[in-house]
């Protein structure tokens, strides 16, 4: 009996490890949709609006995908990129609905929050989607505040990773008066003035003095951006170290304080994990980890940890927060600099500095960092192939791990 009890406990432990291992396999909506040419326009606009990044940072989510014809109808009135982002946000459900679950709804219907609702931009029930399973297996989708009119229907399941992400195709775009309402454009938003008035004048002045980095910030305002600006005291003390950086590294360093997607404080608290920055080049460089510590939200770079101390602006599509220390990217500074003066990475020789590519985003240049090859483009086919190989290896590893565990389970049960 004792042996049987121990075996049962071991089986439960191993089963839990399997679940944890599977849960760690993050999804990539862009790659999932890339396998379906009929959804290419939808996929393209998820990238242009930065919604792909937000979807990838969430788990337990359902994407209501639109084919190219449905997207053409949605884009027929030439909506702004902000309006497109709001409309597509209404097609991202904050719960998991695979094909099977759609036909097994309790009482035949469900009311689901969307990413548009999570932004706080949709008052009342205007950001909720009604899903109803009609007789004959037909499933309809529509706004909750639309008088029960559900005129978009389930077409097929596109991709499912239970219970992490489900991508299902629906017949037409879901209308939303809130999403379609004119949105004041942030083009005239002066982020440097906002930072200066909020106690980050030294950082703002330094950013203004670097045209390449400033252009990157300006190029990302419309699509959505979050900025973490260090307050004057710590950044002023850091300036001598900044001046020792090469021109390319100065640009990367300043871009490291921006994230190319809007993140409200509630989103930061719920989306803990790795986050790309304006300096990221697609090869896993220049990112940091967002993590809650009690009521505080911290940013961890691998060199130091800083804390968000205040909010200067939180109006979609831009959020600006103050932080108590200077973010130190691991690509430019040594981990030992946590307890001592930060030491910038060695500057390249004159020939390397002359050859270093320059320009603004989108990311077509590579970053000058010890772990990167400054002569290879960040978005080269080799990088994409390497990323695909890494993902493939991850899933193959998961399959082998699960097969081994199942074999062990069978052995124990016998």
Image: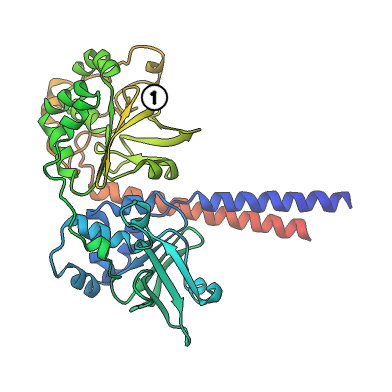
93 vs 408, left or right, is left
Report which residue position mark 1 lands on. 303
User: Which residue is drawn at the image coordinates 11% and 42% (left, top)?
Assistant: 188
Q: Is residue 32 above or below residue 174?
A: above
Give the residue at the far bottom of this rendering.
136
User: Which residue is drawn at the image coordinates 15% and 58% (left, top)?
Assistant: 80
Indicate the quadrant containing the C terminus: top left, top right, bottom left or bottom right. bottom right
User: Which residue is drawn at the image coordinates 38% and 77% (left, top)?
Assistant: 148
Quadrant in the picture for residue 270: top left
Q: Is residue 114 above or below residue 227?
A: below
Whether residue 388 can be seen here: no
Quadrant in the picture for residue 89: bottom left
Residue 68: horizontal and vertical position, in percent?
Answer: 23, 71
Which colouring convention does the figure follow? rainbow
Q: Is residue 112 above or below residue 253?
A: below
Residue 347: horizontal and vertical position, in percent?
Answer: 21, 20
326 vs 9, left or right, is left
Quadrant in the picture for residue 124: bottom left
Residue 202: horizontal and vertical position, in percent?
Answer: 20, 20
Of residues 218 and 149, the one nearer the viewer is 149
Q: Total label count?
A: 1
Of residues 46 and 332, the one nearer the viewer is 46
Residue 35: horizontal and vertical position, in percent?
Answer: 33, 66
* Circle 1: element type: loop
Of residues 74 and 349, the one nearer the viewer is 74
| Category of crowding for the residue at label 1, using alpha-carbon neighbours closer than 10 angstroms: few (below 14), some (14–19), many (at least 20) | many
Whether residue 14 can be seen here: yes
């Amino acid at each position: 009996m004792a042996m049987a009890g121990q075996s049962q406990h071991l089986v439960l432990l191993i089963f839990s490890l399997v679940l944890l291992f599977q849960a760690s396999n993050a999804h990539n909506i862009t790659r999932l949709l890339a396998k379906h040419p009929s959804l290419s326009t939808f996929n393209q606009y998820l990238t242009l609006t930065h919604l792909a990044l937000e979807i990838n940072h969430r788990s337990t989510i359902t994407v209501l995908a639109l084919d190219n014809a449905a997207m053409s109808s949605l884009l027929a009135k030439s909506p702004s990129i902000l309006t497109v982002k709001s409309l597509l946000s209404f097609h991202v459900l904050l719960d998991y609905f695979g094909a099977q679950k759609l036909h097994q709804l309790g009482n035949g219907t469900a009311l689901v929050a969307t990413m548009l609702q999570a932004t706080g931009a949709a008052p009342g029930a205007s950001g909720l989607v009604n899903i109803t399973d009609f007789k004959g297996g037909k499933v309809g989708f529509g706004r909750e505040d639309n008088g029960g009119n559900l005129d978009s229907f389930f077409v097929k399941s596109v991709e499912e990773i239970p219970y992490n992400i489900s991508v299902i195709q629906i017949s037409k775009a879901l209308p939303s008066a809130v999403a379609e309402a004119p949105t004041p454009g942030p083009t005239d938003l002066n982020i440097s003035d906002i930072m200066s008035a909020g106690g980050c004048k030294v950082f703002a002045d330094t950013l203004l003095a670097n045209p390449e980095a400033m252009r990157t910030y300006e190029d990302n305002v419309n699509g959505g951006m979050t900025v973490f600006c260090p307050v004057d005291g710590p950044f002023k003390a850091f300036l001598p170290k900044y001046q020792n950086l090469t021109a390319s590294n100065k640009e990367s360093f300043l871009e490291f304080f921006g994230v190319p997607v809007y993140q409200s404080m509630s989103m930061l608290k719920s989306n803990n994990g790795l986050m790309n920055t304006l300096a990221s080049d697609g090869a896993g460089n220049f990112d940091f980890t967002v993590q809650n510590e009690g009521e505080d939200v911290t940013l961890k770079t691998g060199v130091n940890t800083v804390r968000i101390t205040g909010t200067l602006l939180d109006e979609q599509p831009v959020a600006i927060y103050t932080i108590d220390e200077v973010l130190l990217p691991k690509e430019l500074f040594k981990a030992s600099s946590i307890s001592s003066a930060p030491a910038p990475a060695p500057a390249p020789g004159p020939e390397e500095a002359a050859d270093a590519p320059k320009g603004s985003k989108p990311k077509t240049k590579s970053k000058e960092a010890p772990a990167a090859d400054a002569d290879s483009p960040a978005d080269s086919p080799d990088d994409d192939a390497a990323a695909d190989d890494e993902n493939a290896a991850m899933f193959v590893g998961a399959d082998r791990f699960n097969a081994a565990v199942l074999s062990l389970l069978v052995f124990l049960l016998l």
